[in-house]
Image (tube, helix red, strand yellow):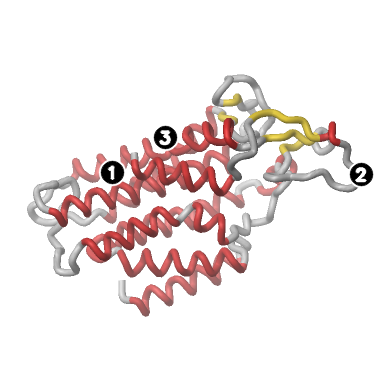
Amino acid sequence: MHPIAALVLCSLLVVHGIRKKSLSSSGAMAASVVGFITFVGGRNANLLFAGVLLGFYLLGSRATKYKQDRKKELEEDFQEGGQRTARQVLANGLTGTVACALHYYLIPLESSAVCYGQVDDANSMWHTILVLVYLGHYACCCGDTWASEIGILSTETPILITTLKRVPRGTNGGVSSLGLAASVAGGFVIGIIAAVGLPLGPTCGGMSQRLQIVFLGALGGLLGSLIDSLLGATLQKSEYNTATAKIAADGRRLRIGEKPTQLQHISGIAILDNHQVNFISSLMTGVL
């Protein structure tokens, strides 16, 4: 995509994000950088890279806003629209942005005949690797977003992935059948978008490569969500606020008038926060 067109598209998306309260001011700045690099860096695979990013952003924002009134009753750190900060944007976009930037520098502009799935030439090999990293990353991010935003609405009490014991809704590492199904669906949608945008030359394969991309997207959504849940259950501290009957926000400290017994430990140790868990899980999914 031409840099000017990329700049215009980024500006429109940032304005949309701020108006819809999907992005904070810092999140808007970070999203501009992520979007610009992605839209410019796709080269011959621009439709795939740009389409996946747009799909993740728009569908993720929609999932966040779905039944907000109900989520407000369940989440202590609820924010209308999500209002993603720069840390959240980078946690969910850095790996994919790096993959896109590497694609820009490693694949020559004139190499329009690179083929996904072929490893007999360097350009096609790097193209395949970076497309898979990008796909895995955003399939994980979309799957995890859908699992969190839709899974919390499940009428089924979630279980902790490490002990299989019932835990309150919103517990880090808690999984439900609805949440797992949502993670697969999120990855599946990303896979479809990537498959539609996958560039295929005249000497490349056709439908089989696209079906593989869709399958890997769904698998990435599920795998990423499971990795996220495992990290959340072990390396992220979850506490239950008995006064509000909600899971306490990340890094929550006692406020004036609150008693130490008000926050009950459920699982995990305070090593990672939610942004770090998201970044590590999406990175691992992309690499795997």
Using residue 79 as the reference point, say whether residue 93 is left or right of it: left
Quarter of the image with the C terminus in it:
top left
Q: Residue at point 53% right, 35% down?
A: 231
Q: Is residue 185 above or below residue 37?
A: above
SS assignment at label 1? helix
Which comes sooner in the sequence, label 1 or label 3? 1
Is there a contact, CB below 8 Å, between mark 2 and mark 1? no
Q: Is residue 121 above or below residue 236?
A: below
Q: Residue at point 84% right, 31% down?
A: 261
Residue 49 image position (x, y, % from top left): 33, 58
Residue 195 image position (x, y, % from top left): 28, 49
Residue at the farthest front position: 271
Question: Please, what is the three-letter code of the amino acid marked with disc 3?
Answer: Leu
User: From the viewer's perspective, is the residue at label 2 or at label 1 nearer?
Assistant: 2
Q: Nearer the viewer, residue 232 or 225?
A: 232
Question: Please, what is the three-letter code of the amino acid marked with disc 1?
Answer: Ile
Question: Please, what is the three-letter code of the amino acid marked with disc 2?
Answer: Gly
- Please tell me in which quadrant of the rendered image residue 42 appears: bottom left
Residue at the farthest right position: 257
Residue 177 image position (x, y, % from top left): 53, 27
Residue linked to disc 1? 213
Residue linked to disc 3? 223
Which comes sooner in the sequence, label 2 or label 3? 3
- Callout 2 crowding tier (Cα within 10 Å): few <14, some 14–19, many ≥20: few
